[in-house]
Amino acid sequence: MNRLKSRIGLTLTFSFSIFIINLITTFIVGVLIYFLFSIGVIKNKNIQHTMVLPILTLIACIIIGIVVSTCSSRVVLKNIREFIEATDKLSRGDFSARLNIKHPPEFNVLSKNFNKMAEELGGIEVLRTDFINNFSHEFKTPIISIKGFAEILKDDNLPKEERDEYLDIIIDESKRLTALATNVLNLSKIETQSILKDKQRFNIGEQIRQSILILDSKFQSKNILLDINIDDYYINGNKEMLNQVWLNLFDNAIKFNERSGIVS
């Protein structure tokens, strides 16, 4: 219905514009001919048996019509030029480009839709940049750690206890790299909406308690007190992705909490 109204409105706008152009042209031609009659340039006896008047009228209509159409089209072309310039900026990665065309109403709608698109593209670009920066940092850290401990393990005089400790760290960092790669794959699946279809019924209260146990050593390292009361509750959802939610939330609660703080 809205699309039909938009098409009808656009048709009426252009039809009215053409009507106004014709009306102005006819009026100017009429005034011109009346003026020529009044000053004696054209006389009745001169045009009774000739085509002077029709030819003059035709020439005047063509010239004045072109002038009026050109002046009228400048307004429409100005809006189109603004749109072309804005889309050109957008194609070059300048997502600050905005349109502010008020008339006709269809161009106003076009302006709003373009501004909304540019705003969302700008937001996506910010998210993409942040993701690349964060992922690069997170991916680089375990690689450096593995490289450093691997070099230490080349020392033949290293005690067995230290060797085992460093090997455990390398194993943990390898698992971290695997988890990062898995998260990237999951992100791709989320974008295609495929992973969100994998739903099952499970106890979300038990899942949250298990997440806390996984991070128990981190809670203890900062002496953070847990004030929790988690009931059993069953839901239908994606168990794997929700588990990532709880782990991220608790990990941030530890990271940004003060020592000997409280998580409620």
Image (tube, helix red, strand yellow):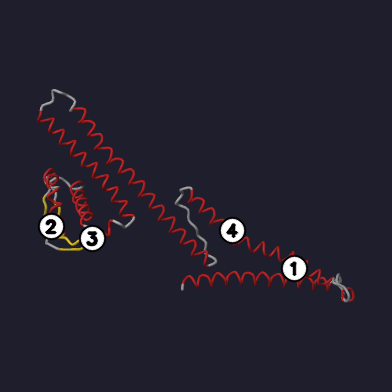
Q: Residue 206: which disc?
A: 2
In this rendering, position of residue 201 left or right of residue 79: left
Q: Are marks 2 and 3 in contact (CB under 8 Å)?
A: no
Which residue is label 4 attached to?
A: 78
Gap in Å between the C-alphas at discs 2 and 4?
63 Å
Name the residue located 77 percent from the left edge and 69 percent from the top edge: 58
Q: Amino acid at mark 3?
A: Lys
| Residue nearest the viewer, comparing 203 with 245 | 203
Residue holding disc 3: 199
Distance (Cα) linking label 4 and label 3:
53 Å
Q: Residue furthest top?
A: 157
Identity of the amino acid at label 4? Lys
State which quarter of the image contains the C terminus: bottom left
First in sequence, mark 2 or 4: give its number: 4
Query: Up-down: is 191 above or below 170?
Result: below
Q: Earlier in the sequence, mark 2 or mark 3?
A: 3
Of tags 2 and 1, the one toward the viewer is 2
Mark 4 near mark 3, Cβ–Cβ under 8 Å? no
Q: Which mark is residue 200?
A: none
Task: Give the Cα distance between marks 1 and 4.
Answer: 25 Å
Residue topped by disc 1: 61
Q: Give the distance between the C-alpha atoms of the residues marked 3 and 1, in whole angstroms.
A: 72 Å
The amino acid pointed to by label 2 is Glu
Mark 4 or mark 3, earlier in chain? 4
Secondary structure, mark 4, is: helix
**Rendered view: 231 above or below 11:** above
